[in-house]
Amino acid sequence: MRLPMTESQKGLLVVDAGAPADSVLYNQLVRFDIDPALSDEAVSRALLTLVTIQPAMREVFAALPQMHASLTPPPVVVPMERVTVQAWEFEQAITDVAQRIGRPTFDLSRGPAYRFALVRAADLSAAAVLLADHHIILDGISLGPFVRDLEAALAHPLSREELAAKREAREIAFRKELEAQTRSASPERVAERAKEWAEQLREVPPLVLSPRPGRPSYTSFTGARISWTMSDAEGKALTELCRRLDVTPFVVFSGMYGLVLARHGNVGSVLIGSPFMARRTIGAFDLCGFFVNTLPVTVEAEWSRTVDEHLGKVVKGAVDHCRSNVDITFNQLVAHARPERSSNRNPLFSAMLAMQDTFSESKGSVLRMHELGNGNAKFDLWLGATPVDGRWQFELEYDRELISPPTADGLLTSLRSAMRRALADSSVALADLFTDWPVPRNDGWHRAIADGSFASIVDDVAAGAPDAVAIETPDRTFTYRELVAAARRVANGLAAKGIGPGDVVGLVNQDLADTTVAILAILRRGAAYLPLDPSLPDERLAYMIEKAGCGFVIGRDAEVSTLDGPGAALVEGTGFPVYVMYTSGSTGKPKGVEMGHGPLANLTAWQLAAMHMDADTRFLQYAPLGFDVSFQEIIPTLVAGGTIVSREPADRRMFPAVLTRIASTEVTHVYLPVAALRPLVQLANARGVVLPHLRYLCVSGEQLMVDDEVRMFFERHRHCVLVNLYGPTETHAVTSHRLSYRENDWAAHVPIGLPYPGVEAYVVDSTGHLAPPGVVGELYLGGLCPATGYVNDPEITAQRFVPDRFAGDGTMYRTGDLVVRDDDDVLTFLGRADDQVKIRGYRIELGEIETVANRCPSVHQAVAVVRGEGVDRELVLFVVPSGELDNDAIKAEMSRSLPSYMVPVWVFELDTVPTTPTGKTDRDALVARSDELLVVPEEPAAVEYEDELERDLAGIWAGVLNVEPIVRDRPVLEYGAHSLTIFTVLAEVQERYGVPVPMIDFFGSPTVATLAGLVRAGKAG
């Protein structure tokens, strides 16, 4: 006889079908410690009785003609592995046997969906029954009836007549419960409530724990567990808190767990899945079965709330909402919410809370019960709460492919901290439940430089090696003697103009020699230089000069060659600004960053050590003077006694000329904007150019993405190191990450690395605390790196340069950048806090999209941008082709390699990638270009299919979804399909065409065209 299945069972059957063939994802393992005096025969007989009188234990399942279950007859004997070991081997034997019976898959169509084992200590000191079952036949609440029946059978064996009567009564009760479940799950009855709830769920941001570029969308669900047990005092405090707030432990655990997830996921609210009892008949409470409904509890994290308010009102209300709507099934919520389905993860929530409190201490033969881990992780994170000997034990199970052990430890530490502080004082604000994590380590590169100003240090270098070449241009060289002499002359001229300590002197772009002379001359006067690019609009230049309080401009008021005057002493001391450089401002007006000597001296000490700079260094001067990198090219090279080499006559944007200049001048160090790296190395690879003298190739300015083209260059240049530097203008460079051929695994999205000695890199999470590894936070920079502030702008300075509360004194700069650090303290840049790129709630890594596109043979260079606002945001890919552009191949590669929300909607051809004056990719220009190119496409007059197979498959979908026509390349999810309907269609496809279609393969691109391709592939072999 066919039996209906509960909606939750149907969902599990779908998951089981979509899992890999050897998956044991929903295999459960439970340990029952029993009276060791019981004989093997008594235990075996009791288990046979239990299987006989519990219909769920004998369920088998089928998909066609529609999902249903049926019962098998009771077995003659229950197979049970028996193991006896020495007492000291008992616990290890439990582990070994559990793995042995828990790892094989269950055939749900044939049954049984359970296995038993009995493990004993030879000295009769301990014994345990182990149960392995598929979750589809037993929910957590079922373990209560299971234990009661087991104990009763052990205490009083049933006669044959009693056994038959109880079996019949239980099967009748089982059928009644299933029928009641079917009636309560009627979509029409709950449609409006389900739709309203789904609308609310769509407002909750996706929870991504331990985010990182390239985080896998699909995993093999391998898991690990860690645990923490409350003390007796903490248990009593919990009981008192629950009594005072009139809440259950489940509410408290949901509230605390939700806060931990919100902190570690950097979100303001989270969804926690949890099973809610949904038994409909009185008789069901004596039954085993899968009669729960797993629903999402919404936990909001308003960090200024008190614990009392959070638990007693917010979380209690969310839990009550779930309980009052337990007749709404998980599948109905998914169907209405239509979440992103581009992975094999749960579509609604990635974290689970399971209360394993169905077993109360017994005076019978079952002494205690405990669910064991089976090495799997159904969710990104699962929290089990189990009462053990009067105390609560918390087990955290995590997916090892998504969360590392140290990150999992951080999650458990946060949970323990939040729980303990809440129990100690529930009047505190939620943010105060957490603690600061230790500050990340630095990279250790540091070579002390001489005391004094940069001008005085260069004087000392010149005194030691006066004839060494300091500057090399295409038409002349300057020795250190000549450089210092010219700088003194110009400084004398500035002194004659009244320039002195603390003044700001403008510097219009000159050639390299005159620029360097002017910089040193300004510094000799204790003044700061202000780079001025004559290509900027006159209005902007005038604003910069006025705002900086600049009264004299070299290149406008006088030339380097004409400045002279009576001898003036070098201004001693390091308490004066070195330069003022302007950066864009949110108000539309640029902000002038006033940088002092201390941060730049610390940066120089790092650079000399990290890049092994000495008298043999030949550093290409590539950057515009108004780009702070120019300081790193010029001053540290002079401090090291090396040679600054002019980029000229090569134009920065003409990469063939730049490559030729690098090769011909035999430079050892080159600093490029990120946007210039790939074109340059691609050109070198294509031409077979080798740069034997190049030792360090440094990049900065935006997120660095590397691909095979970049790796190939460094494989051919094993003597060269790629250095990715990070730092806003307000601090200059503060972190770096190094790559060379020695590293086997180059991440496509290159980290920004470790901070320099003297730099404090604070990752501040949403609670205002220093974040643990794996937690996204805003980067604050303190120690020896923040600038003095914005020149003559105290109000904006106070907004961004704030007191360093973590160090207790000093200043730190709020970067507005989101970062995450890994288990080794290495920082990865994730984007801007105030302008994150998100599509349908998911953070998008544009560089990841570009890396995938760059793998295509027809792509020379790819740039991704986002156009539109709000729900209308969409991805656009611009491609500089390598030969004839193959759009279909690009989109196919995207669909294979990226989640659907990261696949660009549009692909456009481009001649060259536009860049900003500082060499960064000009994405704003590309967004404007996409707006020009796009027009609203007309709907096709008729739906076309490639062949009859596609037409037939579209017909199957139309019949199941009651929608037509079904377009061949449009995801069926957009027509209302969900996991159950997909399961039904794939089962029908297998029956009609004789080809099994793995659900996991179809979900990657759920279209008629994809399904047809999978059917063809199955028929072919």
Image (tube, grey):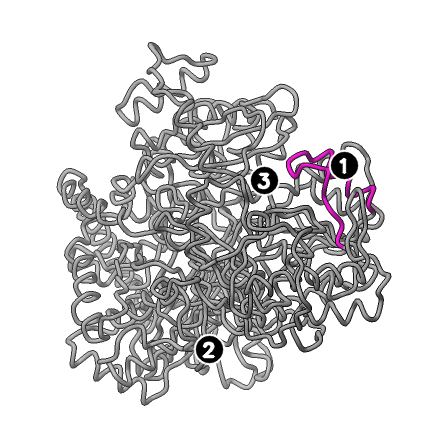
Q: Residue placed farthest to the front in the image? A: 566
Residue 232's place in the image compared with 188, above or below, is below
Q: CA distance from mark 3 to mark 2?
A: 41 Å
Query: Of marks 3 and 1, which one's residue comes earlier in the chain?
Result: 1
**Are the two marked residues, 3 and 1, in contact with CB atoms closer than 8 angstroms?**
no
Q: Which residue is mark 3?
A: 851
Circle 2 sits in a helix, a strand or a loop, which is it? Answer: loop
Q: Which residue is mark 2?
A: 810
Q: Residue placed farthest to the bottom in the image? A: 233
Residue sitting at 46 percent across and 46 percent down? 541
Q: CA distance from mark 3 to mark 1?
A: 18 Å
Task: Name the residue nearer the viewer: 74 or 248.
Answer: 248
| Amino acid type shown at disc 2 | Gly
Quadrant in the picture for the N terminus: top left
| Amino acid type shown at disc 1 | Asn
| Residue 661 belongs to magenta span | yes
Q: In the visual, does 775 lie left or right of 1018?
A: left
Q: Which residue is mark 1?
A: 685
Instruction: Give percent across and percent down for residue 29.
Output: 45, 64
Residue 601's place in the image compared with 14, above or below, is below
Residue 81's place in the image compared with 12, above or below, is below
Q: Which dot, 3 or 2, sits closer to the camera?
A: 2
Instruction: Give percent across and percent down for residue 221.
Output: 50, 54
| Residue 21 belongs to magenta span | no
Range covered by the magenta-colored residues: 644-665
Q: Residues within 10 Å of mark 2 (few under 14, many from 20)?
A: some
Answer yes or no: is residue 58 visible: no
Circle 3 sits in a helix, a strand or a loop, which is it? Answer: helix
